[in-house]
Image (cartoon, rainbow, N blue to C red):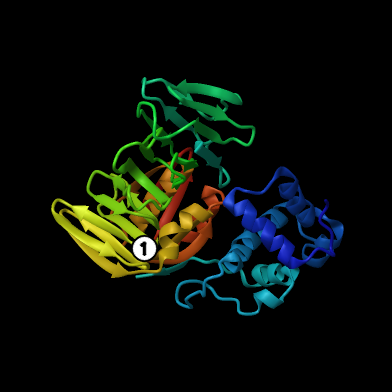
Amino acid sequence: MGMHQGNSDERIILLINKLNKGTASESERREIDEWYDHPASAAKYGDGMSLSQKTRAKDRIFQHINAQIDLHRPSPHRRVSFPLIRSMSIAAVLLLIIGAGLFYFNPKGKQSTSEVQGTSYGVNHNTSKAFLTLASGRQIVLTGAKNGMLASQGSVTINKKTSGQIVYRADDQKTGATEFNSMTTMRGGEYRLTLADGTNVWLNAASSLRYPTIFSGKNREVELSGEAYFEVAHDATHPFRVITKKQTIEVLGTHFNINAYDKELVSKTTLLQGAVRVMVRGASRTLKPGQQAAVTLNKINLENVDVREAVAWKDGFFEFTDTDIQTIMRQISRWYDVDVVYDGKITGETFTGRVSKFLSVNQVLKLVQSPGVHITYEGRRIMVKE
């Protein structure tokens, strides 16, 4: 259905929330576009605007509406706060944004089923590529692959649905030979997997997960390189383990995020729900919800954190709290598939904010600009200098 002036602001926020999560249908995407383009709406918020002005305004309103979708109580020091937005019309929000020119960034010092759901966020980044590597070594490029059955492995068949999901099916996950597949995302891509035991995994960009097509042993084990968010299906008799280069995380049933990219000096495990145990060469620590374990060398440091920052990537955002420029640029590099080089001294300035990954790389970089950071972007290279 079309979006007209009479549609509620709550409807707009619902649709944009679905768009952020990659669950909006094509008709719902059109509905959002029609809302922006409808003459009555335009009269409310965009009368007299040029096309480029409307485009910039649309990008900004996405940012600020996204903030209102976050139902957790915001911390005043972490992002710009608009206490009246919930009661104001979307049009008024946009006028406020245009008038104030505000941004979020504030620089500071029985049948078992497995499925893989691809999502695409952002503007001006390459078409995401993902690969499925079978136990035989055969590699299937999922981007652009035809719908239907892609392969079979013993009692398991692998099918691609019209929705873009890759689905594993087995008559009984307790029988048959255990084979391992790997899902690999390239820079600029994210995928969701539902493993044979019902565990959901969101795989971030430039990451890889090796997992069995059937869980048949005493333990359920997967191997991760990069970053992933897990919602583990509870099975007290079969512990779930995530193995990375530096650590092993063991759970029974829980929600947690692991950031274990090779280029990050610290591997971080953040717990949202349940309990996990982080193990590193004989040392181990058990986390409670709201805690994060940071592993450096052979040490495990625990601290209480705002878990939203750790999982913001899964919901379509970059979020930082007093984050240095190199850490920010590594995230931008992985998502937009660009290279980053530094000219001279690297600034010690830190940044705090939350930005939608729907924005183009140029728009995100503008938000990171400050008197202490000069950024240029040409081709697929970002130059950062103080």
In the displayed orientation, state which residue is furthest to the left: 282
Give the residue type that dot 1 points to: Thr
Residue 262 visible somewhere in the drawing = yes
Query: Is residue 365 positioned above or below 78 on the image?
Result: above
Q: Residue at x 50, y 71 (%)?
A: 79
Q: Which residue is located at x 49 percent, y 31 percent?
A: 171
Report x, y in % for residue 359: 57, 52
Viewer-side residue, 372 vs 56? 56
Residue annotated with mark 1: 323
Q: What residue lies at 51% left-to-right and 29% top-to-bottom?
A: 142
In the rendered image, residue 305, in percent from the top left (x then y), is placed at 36, 69
Q: Nearer the viewer, residue 361 or 19?
A: 19
Q: Left or right of 235: which side holds 159?
A: right
Whole-percent x, y for residue 72 in the image: 52, 71
Q: Is residue 58 among the parts visible in the rendering?
A: no
Secondary structure at badge 1 equals strand
Q: Who's the residue at 69% across and 53% down the image?
A: 55
164 lies above or below 147 = below
Q: Is residue 318 above or below residue 289?
A: above
Placement of the C terminus among the 4 image quadrants: bottom left
x, y percentage for residue 232? 41, 51
The reply, left or right, for residue 356 in relation to residue 135 is: right
- Number of marks in picture: 1
Image quadrant in which you'd find residue 135: top left
Q: Nearer the viewer, residue 29 or 323?
A: 29
